[in-house]
Image: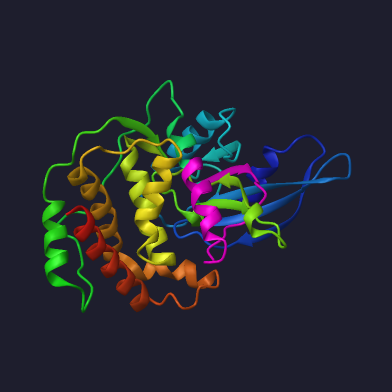
Amino acid sequence: MALAWVNQHLDVGERILRTEALHGGITAEMRRLTIGTREAGTRDLVLRTFVDVEHAEDWLHREADALTLLAGTGVPAPGLVAFDPTAAYCEYPSLLMTHLAGRTVLDDEGLETRVPLLARQLVAIHAVRPAERPREYVAWTTADTVVTPEGADAAAWAAAIDVIRRPAPPGEGRFLHRDFHPGNVLFDVPHAQPAGARITGVVDWAAASWGPADLDVAHCSTNLALLHGPAWGPRFAEAYEEAGGVLAAAANERLYWRVRDGLAFSEDLRAAARPWRRAGRTELTTRAVEERLDAYVIALMDELG
């Protein structure tokens, strides 16, 4: 059904030559479709399919709106080809988009080069000014749903949980990716020159929304802290400001957003770590990630609390 639907959106004379599963996603199945063109060449599309996922219709609408908005902005996002948010034509809600070159890079090697690139890319995303604002952001945790890891610093976690019991700080709204992290950024990294890395794409716009820049910065900071060590969380926030980004002026407001995002990971660290191990970071067991999250929360409370 999905392939028949895809065929309806190909140019005259084009056909699907082969499909290939792409790995790394948590909520959606991804397939690269190689399309044969009339001139005997090929081009690639990507089919994103939400299988038994709650709110799939809403997420696909958000992604389609975001990809439409980003066309022509300079942000390297996929181009929207078609989407079927209610599974009217496909077996499951689906979205068809252009394929971007590059690959995700989760290794420690070359991180010093990639972090400033990530920061500059996020500043560019936040500079987008949509004519119509997307929906307001949704918080991903509450003080009552946090799961303190076994063996964690109980006092630090209790203090951190108290931080997010407060009302969210007011802040100037920005266009947010809302799930910006290394797993959703594609790089071209020359084999002989890792310092020559460049970003070729930003993917997974299903959570695009409107809110303070601190939300996106906090989310990428947590991911970097868990992937590469707690010190990389604050380093990303510094790199964002060095790139021209503006964060909350008050330390307690910055603390709120970074703690809130860090604590959100506590609810399902197993799901967060699984794609990292599949990508080759086999040392990132659930326990290892728990320990890094604990160290990151302690560091945040020591620095900003």
Q: Nearer the viewer, residue 124 or 70?
A: 124
Residue pictured at 75% horizontal, 35% vertical: 11
* Image-quadrant location for residue 80: top right
Tell which residue pokes out farthest to the top in this image.
Answer: 131
Residue pictured at 55% horizontal, 36% vertical: 75
Where is residue 81? Give x, y as percent.
62, 36
Residue pictured at 51% horizontal, 73% vertical: 281
Picture quarter with the C terminus: bottom left
* Image-quadrant location for residue 156: bottom left
Q: Is residue 281 left or right of residue 209?
A: right
Where is residue 59? Give x, y as percent.
42, 43
* The stretch drawn in magenta includes residue 50: no
Residue pictured at 61% horizontal, 37% vertical: 79
Residue 287: in sight, yes or no? Answer: yes
Q: Is residue 184 left or right of residue 213?
A: right
Where is residue 78? Give x, y as percent.
59, 41
Tell which residue pokes out farthest to the right in this image.
Answer: 40
Q: Is residue 288 left or right of residue 182?
A: left
Over which residues does the magenta segment extend? 94-121
* The stretch drawn in magenta includes residue 118: yes
Where is residue 189? Give x, y as percent.
66, 56
Residue 140: in sight, yes or no? Answer: no
Q: In the rendered view, would you say 206 is above or below 223?
A: above
Counting labels gives: 0
Colour theme: rainbow
* Image-quadrant location for residue 152: bottom left
